[in-house]
Amino acid sequence: MSAVPLRNNKAAASAARAVSVLGATGSIGDSTMDLLRGAPERYQVEALTANSNVAALVKLAREFNARFAAIADPDLLKDLQDALSGTGIECGAGESAIIEAAARPADWVMAAVSGAAGLKPALAAVDRGATVALANKECLVCAGDFFMQRAVSAGARILPADSEHNALFQALGSGNREELVRVIITASGGPFRTWDSADIERATLAQALKHPNWSMGQKITIDSASMMNKGLEVIEASYLFGLTPDEIDVLVHPQSIIHGMVEFSDRSVVAQLGAPDMRIPIAHCLGWPDRIVGPSARLDLARIGQLTFEAPDFNRFPGLKLAYDALHTGQGATTVFNAANEVAVAAFIAGKIRFGAIARLVEATMNAWVRSGNLAPLSSADDAIAVDHNARSKAATLLPQIAAKAS
């Protein structure tokens, strides 16, 4: 039994569906709220959360008449309470309040809290058997094995909300697990797709943030430029769909129109296409098992003219190979991969290392972790968070020597 429902799960639509959005003021949250705004009669907002943007959270809570609003920063509780005074909307602050928001009785939960902080809230929704639209990479990259086991045990449904995994989710419905040969995750190639290694090494922050197709946050845009994001997606796909690394391929597709493909034993390849708009996969999750009317632009293939494809270059983008290495290693290695990458990206943004040093710091941290003998199965959120914390410390310790080698 899988926590990811792949086919024949049609259910009757209810008059109004209770929903909660964890991370309502971020980019994924913003797209989700836009979809909810378009169908107010179909959805009742139970809970909304934000990290520190009180003003945006208050505006959304009032607009959608949420029953509960939580801010992650505990120092902002009074600001939130004052702003929502007289509305009848309950308020909370801190980690416990974010977890409470996830545990409240919503049928559908968007898990879009970024970083390791999103793991425990997502598990709170999973443990009560909710349908969870998953947009938090850390839940799978850092804790994939036990996260999915918990979902199966609780009877929760996990719906992938990012474009690539949602594409695979839709395409996988065309066949059975035993008929599957491989899945193919597409990558735009980012802004450095045609650059040589020397130029990628010296790329500036401004250059790394010029994504050709998607409008995203700073961290994920840099990950796209290094193709670390595609490595993270390979890891996610493995845990989400129960795939071996050898069953997952990456294909560079600069137009970002085909988001994922599945090859079956009869050599049929089923693909999901759509404009590069996050509201499309989120709308699929929000309406599932039905489809809702979405506001995204219709796909005009005649105007686009052509779709092109390239094999990924592991030499110019070593982060992608490191992700496969971490997945093969297992035993917490994917947690280390993610933690080291976050430290490396922060260092690049701060001007402490070159762009090309991001992958070198990740590789050095992974190698040190393996040599230390720390590899062990993760069986709880606390295990994953502890490995994440220790890997960040190790990456920070290695940072000066990686920076010195690149200078």
Image: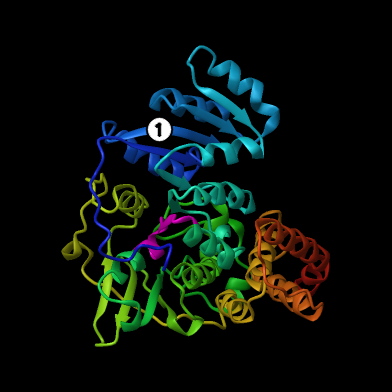
Between 15 and 20, the one lying in front of the other is 15
Visual colour scheme: rainbow
Q: Quadrant of the N terminus?
A: bottom left
Between 70 and 2, the one lying in front of the other is 2
Between 288 and 294, the one lying in front of the other is 288
Where, by quadrant of the figure, is residue 264 drawn? bottom left
Residue 274, image x and y in percent? 27, 60
Residue 266 part of the magenta segment: no
Determine if residue 240 is in view: yes
Residue 354, image x and y in percent? 69, 66
35 w.r.t. 186: above or below: above
Crowdedness of circle 1 by 10 Å Cα count: few (<14), some, many (20+)?
many
- Residue furthest to the left in view is 302
252 w.r.t. 169: above or below: below
Residue 314, image x and y in percent? 54, 82
Question: Residue at the spot x=50%, y=81% of the render?
Answer: 245
273 left or right of 91 in image: left
Question: Residue at the spot x=46%, y=40% of the render?
Answer: 21
Question: Residue at the spot x=57%, y=28% of the render?
Answer: 54
Where, by quadrant of the figure, is residue 144 drawn? bottom right
Element at label 1 = strand
Residue 249, image x and y in percent? 43, 80
Where, by quadrant of the figure, is residue 157 drawn? bottom left
Magenta segment, which residues? 154-166
Report the residue marked by disc 1: 45
- Residue furthest to the top in view is 86
- Three-letter code for the amino acid on which mark 1 is drawn: Val
Question: Residue at the spot x=59%, y=74% of the render?
Answer: 319
Residue 158 part of the magenta segment: yes
